[in-house]
Amino acid sequence: MAAHPDKTGFYPLSDGKEAYFMRLAMIYSAEKSVDIQYYIYRDDSTSSLMTWYLYQAAERGVRVRILLDDMQARNDAALAKLADHPNVELRLFNPFENRSMRAVGFIGDFNRLNRRMHNKAIIADGAFAIIGGRNIGDEYFSANNNVEFGDMDLFLLGKVIPDIALQFDVYWNSEPATPVEHLVDNINPVTEADLEAWKESKLIYLTRSDYAKSLKELPVIQQLLEHSLPLYWSDAKLSYDSPNKVDTDNPTNQSNDGLLLHKISAVLKQTEKSLLIISPYFVPTEDGAKALAEAARQGIDITVITNSLASNDVFSVHGWYAKRRKILLDSGVKLYEVKVERELDKKHSWLGSSRTSLHAKVFIIDQYKTFVGSYNFDPRSAYLNTEMGVFVDSPQFAEQTEQAISSALKRTTYRLKLDNDGDIAWVDDVTGKQYDTEPDTSIWLRFGAWFSGLLPIEKHL
């Protein structure tokens, strides 16, 4: 860092296991503080082990602060037990007031509860951070044998870290961030028996599971021990929504200063040559589709990589995206959709695994500026959920990322085109086969997506 005093160092985490190990390593090595902020924190193997690491950090005297969105925080009792530790604080963002009947509460308070904190960050000792697209759960860290979300994070250090730490503090101290003890009654403290059972289960997992053994073989471990992690160094800028975005009574929550949308739009409008958009949920509004189409007609090389109907875990999103495909293709925008099943290639695992769903959110502008974060190219990220991400100005990283994507596209995606009749066709560039309907889907799935596109729900997607 001494050689780069005014720069940010970053290391891309495209492999799920590496992304998980780096989080554990940050917690394990923390001496003063660990702050974590996530939309989803599952109750499964990887999240449980991370919770154990957080508890052990607290036992060492490390201050642990956990901020979770309440939409996915379903395990109140277990979370509250962790927060019972004197060095651990847990807050839930924009919480449900009715803890036992969430569906009823959601309907009764839809306008507020439909707005969620989608931010994703972990910060250790105010010196290191990871931000990107991953939540905490097996499917994000190559630990689920049935499905994997191909994703991208950045491990960061240097100049941008104080801004990431400030972002956490802004959310932590905001009105929607509610201490869990204000929401959960009769918190049972962690007993010695609980700890022994917990410790035994984690030790068994660490020593016997194939997943844990595979973590120990990661090359990044030796790189960290030898202080040889291959970092990129560049200018970087953190951008994020104000937590007031979820406040439906605050007219300033849609202001230019408060919305990440306007910051991203300002950067995209500066595009001169090329734009690569990677977004699992790609729902350009009518105006957004027209703007992309016009930019393509003016000679800007625009490529979009998103989920196919088969790989998309929210078919209603696909229904609205499908309505914009023709105008984009007709203008020269290149569209690629991720195949749902293919031969596993760990080198490009962030585009997915053998049974996959794309989850990375990456924009590359003019092969120079790259955005990595939680922001999807859809109305929900633009106007409803809070989001965050970092812009890094590194031509080397942008070029290498685009090269990796280009080499993987044929194998991992279908290329869309308009046939002689003006209809959409899906081309498998590996086999040469061309499809005239959404590949790997049933008629009922296609009908469901089509019908969703008729419903007035675009602003919620």
Image: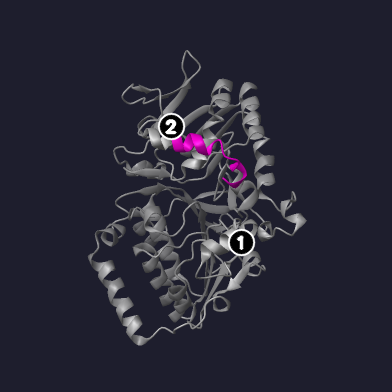
Q: Which of the image's four quarters has the C terminus?
A: top right
Secondary element at tag 2: helix
Label 2 neighbour load within 10 Å: few <14, some 14-19, many 20+: few
Horizontal and vertical percent position of residue 230: 44, 50
Question: Residue 251, located in which quarter of the rendered image?
Answer: bottom right
Horizontal and vertical percent position of residue 228: 41, 55
Q: Is residue 258 left or right of residue 17?
A: right
Query: Which segment is the magenta one?
Result: 447-461
Is 83 in the magenta?
no
Q: Give the residue at mark 2.
A: 406
Q: Amino acid at mark 1?
A: Gly
Picture layout, residue 83 above or below residue 425: below
Q: Give the residue at mark 1.
A: 108
Q: Is residue 75 visible?
A: yes
Which of these two is toward me, 39 or 134?
39
Q: Is residue 426 left or right of residue 378?
A: left
Q: Which label is found at residue 162?
A: none
Which of these two is toward me, 236 or 340?
340
Q: Is residue 37 visible?
A: no
Horizontal and vertical percent position of residue 340: 36, 38
